[in-house]
Every structure is written in structure tokens, then in C-alpha cells.
Image: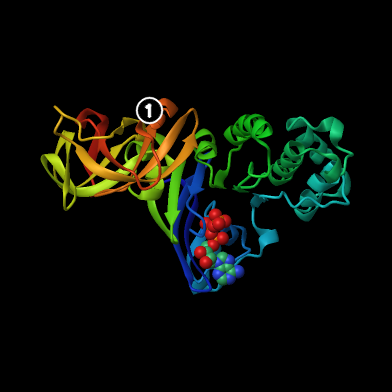
């Protein structure tokens, strides 16, 4: 991407934690920053907002350096063309919805009347014109979220930052608000960074995913690429796949000392093998007639998963298998129980681990 509106290299420290994340976002692009707990997502967002100092690297937005520690450049939060929607919205409880939105505009230099007019216009755009006089405690979670979004967007920020914007909502409100948020983000001409735990939010709302683990980017790309070729356990779990790394030789990938899986693709060298939990069949005894891709395993856990049960297996490789409740009853699945696992070559997807 050559025409990045945001060009950042976020290098920051928090205690012993070290963040080192390059990030480029084009105008109109929505990027989701995903990662497990403690990966550094919030630190990255706070650094972009000017709420956490960089120790090195830079933040350049629309060609202007906001941060560049080596040149002692640092722009205070309120002088950045950045809008933030925090997880708990941080609305002022004593101000009406209109005045919450107007507050940000006033800080950006608008006079009181113009700020109120623009605030009403934005509340109208998020469908809240008739609630403009209400205080935050008189609004539902979804409505408060929309006020926070209106407040962030009203200042026409070059960069919009959203920190888990749907996390505080119940499932039903989340569904509606996600669809509406999608509409507003699609219309936002600036760059958008969305921090989230929720793969669905990321897949629905973002054009591109950047996945961080332990302060580093481990994978990035559009949803189709990332879900088709996960490169870490976290990403594989996120997209609901089993993932194993091994050495490929033709159609065989050795994933453990005592297990080689036959795969559909022909490969050589370091490779990943991915397969869906539903592709793993469980048998009480060694399955006859199908010698490929079967291995002895032991049940380490069983949980509900939609209409099925998700069974965690230990053995030469750690695997999740989805089985129907009827199959689980027949197998009398219980923790510690030995079973045989099987997966067909045609149900696996192998790809090079390098590049
Ligand atoms: N106040 C603090 N003092 C010292 N270290 C901290 C502090 N807050 C966070 N950290 C460290 O910084 C790391 C990154 O935290 P951060 O909140 O950015 O992660 P995150 O990806 O947003 O996590 P989560 O998904 O749990 O919100 C954590 O691993 C934690 O060890």
C-alpha cells in the first residue's frame, strides 16, 4: 500500500512489555487489530491517540508527523485529528447527548452555536435526533454507543479509533449496532482502526486484519487470506481450525515424531496443515480399512459447541473434534478416555509455512 493515510511504527513499553507494530492504513480503509489478551492492542490504540508515549518509531497521519521520538516530536491528544470510541464510551454523565457530541467540536474550535448545530446533525445521522436532550443514563447501551460514535465522527477525524466498540452490548443489540456501525465506517473517508477480540466484528467491519501476539504482528491480510491460511494457533482458533506445523515431503507432512498426515496438496519443507474440528472423526477402536491419518488420542475435555460437542484431544498432536451429542453418547466420551481420531486427506489443507 503506497498511499497510506496513516503510516505508523508503534514502538512502546509498558513495564516489561514491549510493543513493536508497524501499521499502515489507507484513506477509507478499516483495519481490525486482533489478538489475545495482553497482546498489546490497547497499548497500540492508546499510542495512536497520544495517550501512551512512543519510545521509538513514528506516527504520521495525512503526511504530518504526530509522533517521532527521535526528533522529539509529540502531539498532545487534543491536537490530533483523531476520534476515539472507547469500550465504555466515556460519555460525560452530566451532559446531554447533544452536548456530549458538541463538546469535542468546541475543543476543535467551533463556537457554541455551530457546535450544537453540527452535534444535532450527527445525532440525526446515527438516528438519535429525538434523544438529543437525554443524558447518558437515560440511553440504552446501543444508543450510548451511537452517541460515542457521533462524537468521534463529528470532528471529521483523519483517523478513527474504536476500542471494542460493541463489547458492552447484549447479543441482540450487538447485531443491529454492528450492521449500523458497518454503514458509518463505510462512509468514513478517513482511516479506521478497530480493536477487537471478536472475530465476527473483525470479519464484518474490517477490510483487513492485523493480528498481534506478544507485541508483534504475526499475520495480516484480508479475511479470506487469513482464514484460509492461519499462521499461528491463536489465528487458527479464531477461525475455528486445527493447525499443525511440520515437515512436508510430497503428500505427507510429519507433524509429530510419531504422526505423519497425508494431505491433498504436494509440498516440500516447512508446512502448515489445517483442518476443521468437524472433519475429525472419533472411533472407540482403531478404524479398519482406512490406515491413513488415524492416531490414538485421549479426551482432555468436552464442551458444548452450538448443536454439537467440541472434544479436546491430547496425543501426538492436540486437536479439537466436533461430534454430535448422539455420537458422543455412543462413544461414552469422558475426560481421560482413549479414542482413535481420523481425518481424511481431502479434509485437510496444507500450505507452506514460509512466505
Ligand atoms: N499498567 C500497566 N503496567 C505494566 N504493564 C502493563 C500495564 N498495562 C498493561 N501492561 C502490560 O502490557 C501488555 C499489553 O497490554 P494491552 O492492554 O495493550 O493488551 P491488549 O491486547 O489490549 O489486552 P486485552 O485484550 O486484555 O485488553 C500486557 O501484557 C500487560 O502485561
Identify which residue, 56 or 321, lies in the foreground. Answer: 321
Identify which residue, 85 or 199, lies in the foreground. Answer: 199
Q: How is the image coloured?
A: rainbow
Quick check: 303 above or below 159?
above
* Left or right of residue 21: residue 198: right
Helix, strand or loop at mark 1? helix
- The residue shown at (30%, 34%) is 282
The mark tally for this picture is 1
Q: Position of residue 160 (x, y in %)?
A: 61, 47
Say if residue 61 shows up in the picture: yes
* Left or right of residue 122: residue 77: left
- The residue shown at (68%, 40%) is 169
- The residue shown at (27%, 46%) is 244
Quick check: 324 above or below 352?
above
Identify which residue, 170 or 296, lies in the foreground. Answer: 296
Say if residue 323 shows up in the picture: no
Q: Position of residue 203 (x, y in %)?
A: 49, 36
| Classed neighbour count for the residue bearing mark 1: other residues with Cα under 10 Å, few (<14), some (14–19), many (≥20) | some
* Left or right of residue 246: residue 232: right
Q: Position of residue 343 (x, y in %)?
A: 25, 33
- Where's ligand 1: which quadrant? bottom right
* Left or right of residue 208: residue 284: left
Quarter of the rendering occupied by the N terminus: top left
Name the residue that disc number 1 marks: 327
User: Which residue of the protein is positioned furthest toward the left in this rendering?
Assistant: 250
Q: Position of residue 68 (x, y in %)?
A: 51, 67
Quick check: 231 above or below 176?
below
- The residue shown at (64%, 57%) is 80
- The yes-or-no answer for disc 1 within 8 Å of ligand 1 is no
Amino acid at each position: 500500500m503506497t498511499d497510506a493515510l496513516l503510516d505508523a511504527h508503534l514502538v512502546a513499553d509498558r513495564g516489561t512489555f514491549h510493543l513493536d507494530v508497524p501499521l499502515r492504513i489507507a484513506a477509507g480503509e478499516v483495519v481490525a487489530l486482533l489478538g489475545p489478551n495482553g497482546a498489546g492492542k490497547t497499548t497500540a490504540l492508546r499510542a495512536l491517540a497520544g495517550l501512551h508515549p512512543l519510545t521509538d518509531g513514528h506516527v504520521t497521519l495525512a503526511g504530518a508527523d504526530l509522533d517521532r521520538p527521535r526528533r522529539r516530536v509529540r502531539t498532545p491528544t487534543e491536537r490530533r485529528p483523531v476520534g476515539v470510541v472507547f469500550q465504555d464510551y466515556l460519555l460525560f454523565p452530566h451532559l446531554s447527548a447533544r452536548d456530549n457530541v458538541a463538546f469535542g467540536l468546541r475543543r476543535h474550535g467551533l463556537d457554541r452555536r455551530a457546535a450544537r448545530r453540527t452535534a444535532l446533525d450527527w445525532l440525526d445521522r446515527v438516528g438519535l435526533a429525538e434523544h438529543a436532550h437525554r443524558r447518558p443514563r437515560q440511553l440504552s447501551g446501543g444508543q450510548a454507543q451511537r452517541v460515542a460514535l457521533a462524537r468521534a465522527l463529528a470532528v471529521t477525524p483523519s483517523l478513527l479509533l474504536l476500542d471494542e466498540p460493541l463489547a458492552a452490548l447484549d447479543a441482540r443489540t450487538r447485531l443491529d449496532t454492528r450492521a449500523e456501525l458497518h454503514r458509518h465506517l463505510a462512509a468514513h473517508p478517513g482511516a479506521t482502526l478497530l480493536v477487537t477480540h471478536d472475530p465476527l466484528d473483525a470479519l464484518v467491519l474490517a477490510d483487513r486484519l492485523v493480528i498481534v501476539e506478544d507485541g508483534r504482528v504475526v499475520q495480516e491480510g484480508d479475511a479470506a487470506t487469513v482464514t484460509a491460511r492461519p499462521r499461528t494457533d491463536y489465528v487458527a482458533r479464531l477461525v475455528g481450525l486445527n493447525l499443525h506445523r511440520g515437515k512436508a515431503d510430497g503428500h505427507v507432512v510429519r507433524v509429530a515424531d510419531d504422526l505423519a498426515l497425508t494431505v491433498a496438496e504436494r509440498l516440500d519443507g516447512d508446512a502448515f496443515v489445517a483442518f476443521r474440528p468437524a472433519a475429525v472423526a472419533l472411533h472407540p477402536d482403531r478404524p479398519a480399512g482406512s490406515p491413513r491419518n488415524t492416531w490414538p488420542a485421549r479426551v482432555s475435555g468436552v464442551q458444548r459447541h452450538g448443536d454439537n460437542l467440541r472434544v479436546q484431544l491430547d496425543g501426538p498432536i492436540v486437536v479439537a473434534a466436533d461430534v454430535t451429542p448422539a455420537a458422543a453418547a455412543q462413544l461414552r466420551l469422558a475426560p481421560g478416555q482413549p479414542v482413535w481420531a481420523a481425518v481424511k486427506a481431502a479434509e485437510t489443507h496444507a500450505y507452506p509455512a514460509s512466505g
